[in-house]
C-alpha cells in the first residue's frame, strides 16, 4: 500500500535541488536562453527570451526529473528496475535515463500516444505497455505493476526527486539572468512549477511566479515552446522575468 502523500516544505526541497544539480549534468544539458524577436503585443522596452529545454536529448525538461529520480535510487533498488506511466515526454526521460544508468525500465502508455515517441522509448531500451484509452488507466496499471513486482514507480510530478530535478531550471535561471522580475511557467501536473518556484522563492524572491496553461495552436507544424523570459526597463533600471509562449495560428 502506498504511503499517504505529504506536503514537502521548501526547506526540505531546496537541498534536494542542489543535490540534483550536483549529479544530473552527466546526462542533462544546461540549456541556453535565446533572445526572441519583438512582438507587436509587447512594449518595445520588453526583451523576451526562451529557455530552450527542447535542447535536451529527449526534447523536454522531463529528462531532468527522471534522471534525478533514477540517480537517487540505491544499487539494489535500481537493479530491480523502474516503472513509469506517460503520454510521451516523461516516458522518454525515464527511458533515456534508464539506458544511461543501465536500469531496466517499463513505460505504460494509453492508446493514442504518438508512434514516434513510442519508437524513441523503445530505442532507448524501455519496454512499452499500452493500457486503456486514457492516461489515468495507464497510470493505475503502472502503479499496480510496480507494487506487485517490487519495482520503483517514477511519477511524472508527484515525487520529491522528480520535482527537485525540474527545479534545476530555477538554479540555471538565477545564474543566467539574476534580475528575474516575473516567471510564467507552463503547468500540467505541477512538478515543474513546484521545483522552479521553490528555488526562485529562495534565490530570486523579487520574482513574481505565475502559472500558465499551454494552448494548442491547431497547426501541426507549431508546438508550445514552454516558457520564456522577458526583460524590461522599469523606472530607469532593467528588470526581467518569465513569459509563457504559445503557438499562434
Image: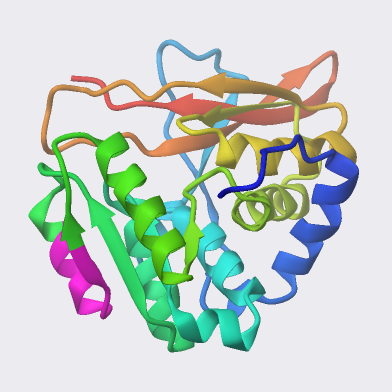
> Is residue 135 among what the camera can see?
yes
Q: What x and y, as percent, mark residue 142?
A: 34, 54
Residue at 19%, 60% in the rendered image: 129
Q: Is residue 58 magenta?
A: no
30, 135: nearer the viewer? 135
Residue at 32%, 34% in the rendered image: 224
155, 241: nearer the viewer? 155
Count up the numbered dots.
0
Please report the bounds of the magenta region as a residue range. 117-128
Left/right of residue 112 with respect to residue 155 in the rendered view: left
Which quadrant of the structure image shows residue 226?
top left
Q: What x and y, as percent, mark residue 228?
A: 52, 36
216, 118: nearer the viewer? 118
Which quadrant of the structure image shows residue 56?
bottom left
Residue at 88%, 39% in the rendered image: 202
User: Where, quadrant-wise, is the C terminus in this rendering?
Assistant: top left
Left/right of residue 239 with respect to residue 124 in the rendered view: right
Q: What x and y, as percent, mark residue 81?
A: 43, 77
> Is residue 57 among what the camera can see?
no
Q: What x and y, as percent, mark residue 46?
A: 60, 22
Residue at 57%, 79% in the rendered image: 77
Amino acid at each position: 500500500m502506498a504511503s499517504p502523500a505529504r506536503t514537502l516544505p521548501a526547506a526540505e526541497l531546496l537541498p534536494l535541488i542542489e543535490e540534483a544539480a550536483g549529479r544530473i549534468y552527466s546526462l542533462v544539458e544546461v540549456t541556453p536562453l535565446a533572445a526572441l524577436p519583438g512582438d507587436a503585443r509587447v512594449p518595445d522596452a520588453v526583451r523576451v527570451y526562451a529557455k530552450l529545454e527542447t535542447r535536451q536529448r529527449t526534447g523536454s525538461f522531463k529528462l531532468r526529473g527522471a534522471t534525478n529520480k533514477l540517480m537517487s535510487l540505491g544499487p539494489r533498488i535500481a537493479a530491480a528496475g523502474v516503472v513509469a506511466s506517460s503520454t510521451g515526454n516523461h516516458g522518454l526521460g525515464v527511458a533515456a535515463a534508464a539506458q544511461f544508468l543501465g536500469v531496466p525500465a517499463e513505460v505504460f502508455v494509453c492508446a493514442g500516444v504518438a508512434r514516434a515517441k513510442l519508437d524513441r522509448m523503445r530505442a532507448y531500451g524501455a519496454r512499452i505497455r499500452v493500457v486503456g484509452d486514457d492516461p489515468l488507466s495507464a497510470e493505475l496499471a503502472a502503479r499496480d505493476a510496480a507494487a506487485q513486482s517490487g519495482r520503483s514507480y517514477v511519477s511524472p510530478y508527484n515525487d520529491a526527486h522528480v520535482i527537485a530535478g525540474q527545479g534545476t531550471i530555477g538554479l540555471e535561471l538565477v545564474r543566467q539572468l539574476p534580475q528575474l522580475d516575473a516567471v510564467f511557467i507552463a503547468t500540467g501536473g505541477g512538478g515543474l512549477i513546484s521545483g522552479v518556484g521553490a528555488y526562485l522563492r529562495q534565490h530570486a524572491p523579487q520574482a513574481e511566479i505565475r502559472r500558465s496553461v499551454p494552448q494548442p495552436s491547431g497547426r501541426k507544424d507549431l508546438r508550445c515552446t514552454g516558457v520564456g523570459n522577458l526583460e524590461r526597463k522599469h523606472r530607469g533600471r532593467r528588470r526581467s522575468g518569465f513569459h509563457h509562449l504559445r503557438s499562434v495560428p
